[in-house]
């Protein structure tokens, strides 16, 4: 009988020792803080704030400026007489600025219709990992363009407002892995004035874009905008662009082909006249160089 009491006492003692040790572990965790993963914003979904033509879900870092040169040559199907489009070119020079981690703006000038353009991009939700993570990014873009060409008919009263157009976008995107990023972009483009009464002032489109990383410094990119309305048969087409991004030190150099001439939203969504099926495509390149304008505070 005495042995039974001894065994019972040992079991009770072991139980209380275990509970005490477990309680000590919990108290220690409270003192040092539990090892929860911190919330991290997902970055490098794309290598620049643009896919090719359209805006991407990516944002510039606060205090940085992205100087961008976009160059689009003539149509390849023009043959040797125009040196396969290289004798002709249109371009856009732009400046983009990162304000906060989810806010940026930019402006630029295009040779196509001598247009000035500006935009602001804000992400109320960004894809993140860790504590309170979110699976995708939602970004809002609002922009305006201004045609600076002389009025078509200076003999009549012309209004400044006829030079203006606006666009509004919602970008919904996700970086699925280090190699794959996809996004969709519902878009509205409003032209204050259109050439023909048969054309709508409001054009609705849905953009699709993606990036597939093939090496440490190279990735395939593409963007396409499906036009819900505003297509005039045999005159304008949905813009499709396919490119290769190459990182070279502080630059991102992109080679691409596209059926669009214009390089702002109003131009490439509503005025793309090239037909891919007929070879009416253009070779081009985008050059991006980021500069640090303001040193970020260290936490």
Image: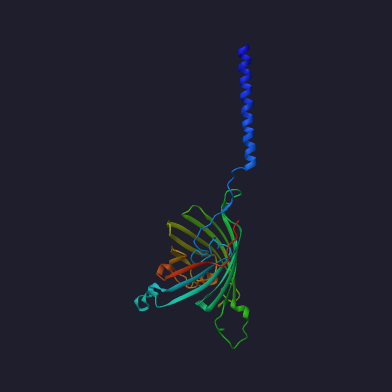
The reply to whether residue 233 is in sight is no
Q: Quadrant of the C terminus?
A: bottom right
Residue 276, quarter of picture:
bottom left
Colour scheme employed for the rendering of this structure: rainbow
Q: Which residue is depicted at the point 43% across and 70% down?
A: 284
Relative to 158, is 13 above or below?
above
- Residue drawn at x 49%, y 67% is 289
Residue 130 position within the rendered picture, expressed as x and y whole percent measured from the top left: 57, 48
- Where, by quadrant of the figure, is residue 57 drawn? bottom right
Q: How many marks?
A: 0
**Residue found at the far left of this picture:** 80
**234 shown above or below 174:** below
Q: Is residue 82 above or below residue 296?
A: below
Q: Position of residue 16 (x, y in %)?
A: 64, 26
Q: Position of residue 182 (x, y in %)?
A: 50, 57
Q: Quadrant of residue 148?
A: bottom right
Judging depth in this view, the residue of 262 and 247 nearest the camera is 247
**Quarter of the picture holding the N terminus:** top right
Instruction: Kindly give the residue lying farthest to the bottom in the view shown.
Output: 155
* Residue 65: x %, y % from top left: 55, 68
Of 172 and 293, nearer the camera is: 293
For the residue pair 39 and 171, the one nearer the viewer reads as: 39
Residue 283 located left or right of residue 92: left
Residue at point 63%, 15% (across, down): 5
The reply to whether residue 118 is in sight is yes
């Amino acid at each position: 009988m005495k042995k039974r009491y001894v065994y019972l006492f040992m079991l009770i003692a072991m139980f209380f020792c275990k509970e005490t040790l477990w309680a000590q572990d919990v108290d220690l965790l409270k003192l040092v803080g539990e090892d929860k993963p911190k919330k991290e914003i997902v970055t490098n979904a794309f290598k620049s704030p643009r896919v090719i033509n359209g805006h991407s879900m990516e944002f510039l870092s606060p205090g940085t400026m992205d100087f961008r040169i976009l160059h689009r040559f003539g149509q390849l199907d023009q043959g040797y007489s125009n040196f396969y489009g290289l004798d002709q070119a249109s371009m856009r020079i732009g400046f983009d600025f990162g304000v906060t981690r989810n806010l940026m703006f930019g402006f630029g000038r295009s040779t196509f219709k001598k247009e000035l353009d500006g935009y602001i991009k804000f992400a109320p939700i960004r894809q993140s990992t860790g504590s309170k993570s979110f699976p995708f990014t939602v970004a809002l873009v609002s922009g305006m363009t201004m045609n600076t060409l002389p009025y078509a008919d200076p003999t009549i009263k012309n209004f400044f407002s006829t030079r203006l157009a606006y666009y509004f976008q919602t970008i919904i995107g996700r970086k699925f892995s280090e190699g794959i990023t996809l996004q969709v972009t519902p878009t509205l483009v409003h032209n204050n004035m259109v050439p023909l009464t048969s054309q709508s002032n409001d054009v609705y489109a849905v953009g699709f874009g993606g990036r597939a990383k093939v090496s440490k410094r190279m990735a395939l990119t593409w963007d396409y905008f499906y036009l819900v309305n505003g297509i005039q048969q045999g005159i304008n087409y949905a813009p499709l662009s396919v490119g290769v991004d190459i990182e070279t030190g502080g630059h991102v150099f992109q080679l691409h082909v596209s059926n669009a001439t214009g390089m702002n939203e109003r131009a490439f969504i509503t005025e793309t006249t090239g037909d891919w099926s007929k070879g009416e495509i253009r070779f081009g390149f985008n050059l991006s160089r980021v500069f640090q304008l303001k040193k970020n505070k260290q936490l």
